[in-house]
Image (cartoon, grey):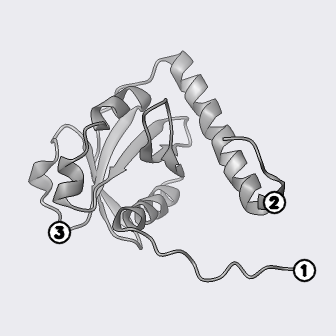
Amino acid sequence: MRCDPGPPPTLTPGAELARGVCRCLASMDFAPLVEFVPARGLRVDVMALGPGGEVWVIECKSSRADFQSDQKWQGYLDWCDRFFWAVSPDFPTELLPADAGLFLGDSYGAELVRMSPEARLPPARRKALTRAFARQSAWRLQRQMDPAAMSGGA
């Protein structure tokens, strides 16, 4: 017997922006993962693994208040090679730190408008992070394929 999953969930403005950023990243041959936890107490909006193993973190901000209330973003810098903000085209980008990359987008797509400077991860951290990324991605896929059988994992 097949269950009807019903209508797709309504996305928050931040989740809509993340979807557009993920579409852009996929077109750049990056594998994006939303709401990734690189370390206890941190949850990045989008982490993406590039074709050469590079790790990008993208924080999606749906409003001025959302940006101003974010107190954790600098903690993400130790967990990526490049850090980006993603905002809508009408966001006041002058509020964002100029030393980070920038995506402009919406729920349908995004555009990389400013590349972030690179700060390469140490090899041991890259290995651990890549492994955690792969495991979390695999668990999510397995839960989607067989939610009733999944009781453990990330």
**Regarding mark 2 in the picture, which secondary structure is present there?**
helix
Residue 84 spot, x, y in % from top left: 31, 45
Name the residue at 47% across, 75% down. 10
Q: Residues within 10 Å of mark 3 (few under 14, many from 20)?
A: few
Q: What amino acid type should be assigned to the residue bearing mark 3?
A: Asp
Q: Position of residue 49 (x, y in %)?
A: 53, 42
User: Left of 45 or right of it: where is 2?
Assistant: right
Where is residue 127 drawn, in percent x and y?
59, 24
Badge 1 amino acid: Met
Q: Say left or right for 124 vs 116.
A: right
Assign the C terminus to one quadrant of the image.
Answer: top right
Label 2: few (<14), some (14–19) or many (≥20) C-alpha neighbours in 10 Å: few
Q: Is residue 74 left or right of residue 143?
A: left
Specify whether 93 is left or right of 88: left
- Which is nearer the N-term, disc 3 or disc 2? 3
| Dot placed on the residue nearer the N-terminal end, 1 or 3 | 1
The residue beneath circle 1 is 1
